[in-house]
Amino acid sequence: MTPTRFPNSRVGVFGQRSPDSGHAVARTAQDAWNTRDPARVALACTEDSEWRGRDLFLRGREEIVESLTAKEREPGYRLRKELWACTGDRIAVRFEYEYHDASGQWFRAYGTEDREFDANGLMRRRYASVNDPAVAPEERRIAV
């Protein structure tokens, strides 16, 4: 597999990311995560990419793949991302996803994610803040 570069994400000192390219980056990331293929998601990152989410601090593609593989313990996982802001080599997105545990209890995770890209369009840093309260089945909003 070759690295997946986010659309129109190559920016330089003089470049600014347009809102359209920011939306495309968010959609591309959403689609990649929803494949549930950790290796595909990790290829969009630099080899030494830094991630923080919840209480996890990850560095490098190998740790990212291991962490995303653990998401298999979240059956029914389906993600939505929405662009909030973009400028230069950074974007901010709002996200939500739903999943259930082994007992059938559903959860909806909400959060924000800040991303920074290198000159080649690969994700260098990702910082996410997430809350995931329990929801009743009839409160679900994301079709699985």
Image: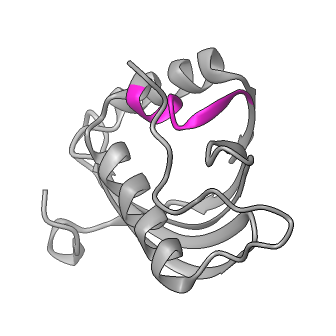
Residue drawn at point x = 47 percent, y = 68 percent:
95
Q: Is residue 79 left or right of residue 75?
A: right
Q: Position of residue 13 (x, y in %)?
A: 86, 66
In the image, 2 versus 61, the foreground residue is 2
Q: Which residues are magenta?
A: 40-48
> In the picture, which quadrant includes the C terminus?
bottom left
Q: Is residue 20 left or right of residue 37?
A: right
Q: Position of residue 46 (x, y in %)?
A: 68, 31
Residue drawn at point x = 51 percent, y = 78 percent:
83
Colouring method of the image: one colour
* Residue 107 seen by the camera: no
Quadrant in which residue 73 is drawn: top left
* Residue 117 seen by the camera: yes
In the image, 2 versus 109, the foreground residue is 2
In the image, residue 134 sits, relative to residue 52, either above or below, namely below
Residue drawn at point x = 47 percent, y = 63 percent:
25
Q: Position of residue 65 (x, y in %)?
A: 52, 22
In the image, 124 versus 14, the foreground residue is 14
State the count of labels: 0
Quadrant in which residue 137 is drawn: bottom left
> In the picture, which quadrant includes the N terminus?
top left
In the image, residue 97 sits, relative to residue 87, either above or below, namely above
Q: Is residue 96 left or right of residue 121?
A: left
Magenta stretch contains residue 5: no
Furthest residue in direction right, as rendered: 13
Magenta stretch contains residue 44: yes
In the image, residue 137 sits, relative to residue 49, either above or below, namely below
Quadrant in which residue 71 is drawn: top left
In the image, 8 versus 86, the foreground residue is 8
Residue drawn at point x = 46 percent, y = 81 percent:
20
In the image, residue 34 sits, relative to residue 86, either above or below, namely above
